[in-house]
Image (cartoon, rainbow, N blue to C red):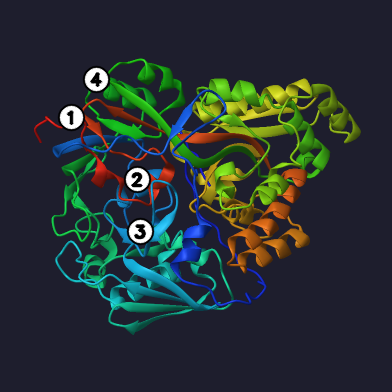
Amino acid sequence: MTTSPVQGPRRPSRRRGRIAAATAVLSSFALLAACSGPPKSGTGSTGAGVKLSASTPPARGEIDSFTWAVYAEPPTLDYTVAFDYPQNTILSNVCESLMRWTPGLTMEPGLARKASNPDPNTWVYDLRPGVRFHDGKVMTADDVVYSLGRQRDPKNAAAWAQTFQNVTSLTKTGPLQVTVKLKKPDSQFPQYMATAAGVVASRAGVEAAGKDYGTTGDLACTGPFKLGTWSKGQSIELERFDGYWGTKAKAKKAVFRILTDPSARTNAMLSGEIDGGYLIPTESYDRLRNSGVGKLWFGEGLSTVNVDITNMTGPLGDLRVRKALSLALDRSGFVKAGLGGAGTVTTSLTTRAAWAGASEQTRKDAFGALPPAAQDIEKAKALIKEAGATGKTLTVATSSIGQDVSLLATAIQAAGTQIGLKINLRTIAPNAFTALFTDPKAREGIDMFPLTYYDSITDPLDLLTNFKTGAYMNFADYSDKGYDALVDQATGVYEPEQRMRIEAEMQKRVAEQLPWIPVAEWPTAVFLNKRITGAPTTISYMYHPWAAGVGAADAGATP
C-alpha cells in the first residue's frame, strides 16, 4: 500500500479466512527461500530504456559518516508501526527480524539461524547464539516471544497485527528456540518474518522505555547501527554498533536528513550536502543523471502504480465504467511524464518479479490473458454510453506530494473527459494524504486516488489479498465470494508453484473486475555521489541492513 513524495504510506493487510489444509510436512529453510525471488539475473530493463541493477559496486573502504535524505520524519521508530518508507529505511539498519530479505529479494536466515516446519500448523525458529542487543544484553527466546507478542497486543494497534491473526500461540521451547502454532496452514506468515513484523527487541529495553519507546533513547535492538542523536524535524543519526554479531558497518555514522521538499532534496544531493537517497523525485531523474556528481541507479521495486477505486456505490460500481477508464488512460504518457520514463506500462496489478518463483506456464497463465495497455478511446466511449454514465461526475484526489500522484490524477481527469465523464480533482495537502489510507472520513466524497503499492514479500498474494472481502485496503468494499475462497486456498498452500497456480487464477479475476486500475510498474531509484557506494538498488532496503554496506567508493580515501 503506498504513496508519498515519490511513493507512500503502505499498511499491510492480512485478513485470513478458511484455508485448505496442507498435506505434506515441509522441509525448513529450502522451501522458504523458494517462496521468494528475484529478479533472477543481476540486471534487467523496465522496457523504457532504464537498466535495472541488483546493487551498486561494493565499498572499497571505511568512512567516518555519510548523509542520506528522507522525505519525512518518522513519527516513531517503534517496529510495530513501521509500515512506511521513512521508518523502515532507517529502522532496517537498527532492528533486525527473525528472517531477512537479501538485496536480490530472496529470503535468508536473520536472527533465527534456522526456520523449520515440522507440521503444517507449526513453525519453529532456532535462534543464533551470542547475539547482543545494543545495551550488551544477550538475546534469548524470551525476547522473541515478547517482541512478536507486542505485534499481537490490541493495545499497541500494530500495523502488522493481521500478520498474526492465524497465530494461536508463541512459546519458548528452549533457551534459543521459539515455536509458533497456527490455527491453520499459512504460507504468508513465515515470509513476513523477514519484514518489520518479525523484529526482535530486548524485552528489558522496551519495558524500560515505556510509552517513550521508539521516540527517544535506545531502540533495544541488535542491528549494525544503534540510534544516536534525534534532532526533531532535522535529522536522525545512527552510530555503528561494534558489538554486532554480523559484518561490521563500513561507516561509523549514518545521518538521515529530513528534507520534505523534493527540490530541496535534489539540490542537496547536487551540492554534496547529501551523499545519497532512495525515493528520488521523478522530476529530478534527468538532473541527477546528467549532473556529473554521482550516479542514479535503478533496481527492482516490486511496485505498481494504480488508480485505487474507493467508491463503488456510484458510477464506478458499474464494471463498464471502470473498464472504460482503463481503456482511456494514456499509460505511456504517464510513464514518460509522471515516472520520468522509468517504468513499464501494465494492466497487471502484480509485478512480473513477484512471479519469479513460478513456472513459465504459470507466469503465462497469470499474464497471458490480461487486457491490452494501449488506449482505445472509441471503445471506452461506447462502454460509457452503454452504461448510461455519460455526463456523470467522479472525484479524484490529487496532491503536490509528487509527480507520480499529481500527474496520474491529471491523466485520469483527461481520460474521463475524453469519454464523456466529468472528473473533478480534489487537492489533498501532502501531510494529509496518508489519511486516505487510514481514515474512512478522509475518503468521503472521493471516488479514486493514485496509489503506488509495493510488496513486502516476493509473493503475488501480498497484493492480491487486498481484494478479499473486508481486507484493510479494500476501500470500496469489493466482494466476490469465489475470489475470497481462492485467497484462503492460496494462503494455505506452502508449495510455491502450487500456490502460484491459484494466484494466477486470482490475477485473472482482478484483471477482469478492476477493483483497482493498474497503470505501470515502477523500479526503485537510488542516487549516490562519487564519495560513497555499496547501497543495494532494490527495495530490499526496507527490511535489509543496507547502510552497513555503504562505504568509500575510492580505496585510497581516508575515513
The quadrant of the image that shows the C terminus is top left
Q: Nearer the viewer, residue 229 or 327?
A: 327
Which tag, 1 or 2, sits closer to the chain's start?
2
Q: Is residue 468 visible?
A: no
Q: How many marks?
A: 4
Q: From the image, tell me which residue sits under label 2.
A: 89
Q: From the image, tell me which residue sits under label 1.
A: 554
Which quadrant holds residue 96?
bottom left
Q: Amino acid at mark 4?
A: Ser
Q: Amino acid at mark 2?
A: Thr
Residue 117 screen position, x and y as percent: 48, 75
Front disc: 3 or 2: 2
Residue 114's disc is none
Q: Amino acid at mark 3?
A: Tyr
Residue 491 screen position, x and y as percent: 61, 65
**SS of the residue under disc 3:** helix
Q: From the image, tell me which residue sits under label 3.
A: 79
Mark 3 and mark 2: Cα distance apart in space: 12 Å
Which quadrant holds residue 310?
top right
**SS of the residue under disc 1:** loop
Front disc: 1 or 2: 1
Residue at point 42%, 27% (across, down): 281
**SS of the residue under disc 4:** helix
Residue at point 50%, 44% (across, down): 40
**SS of the residue under disc 2:** helix
Which tag, 1 or 3, sits closer to the chain's start?
3
Q: From the image, tell me which residue sits under label 4.
A: 271
Mark 1 and mark 2: Cα distance apart in space: 25 Å
Q: Is residue 102 visible?
A: yes
Which tag, 2 or 4, sits closer to the chain's start?
2
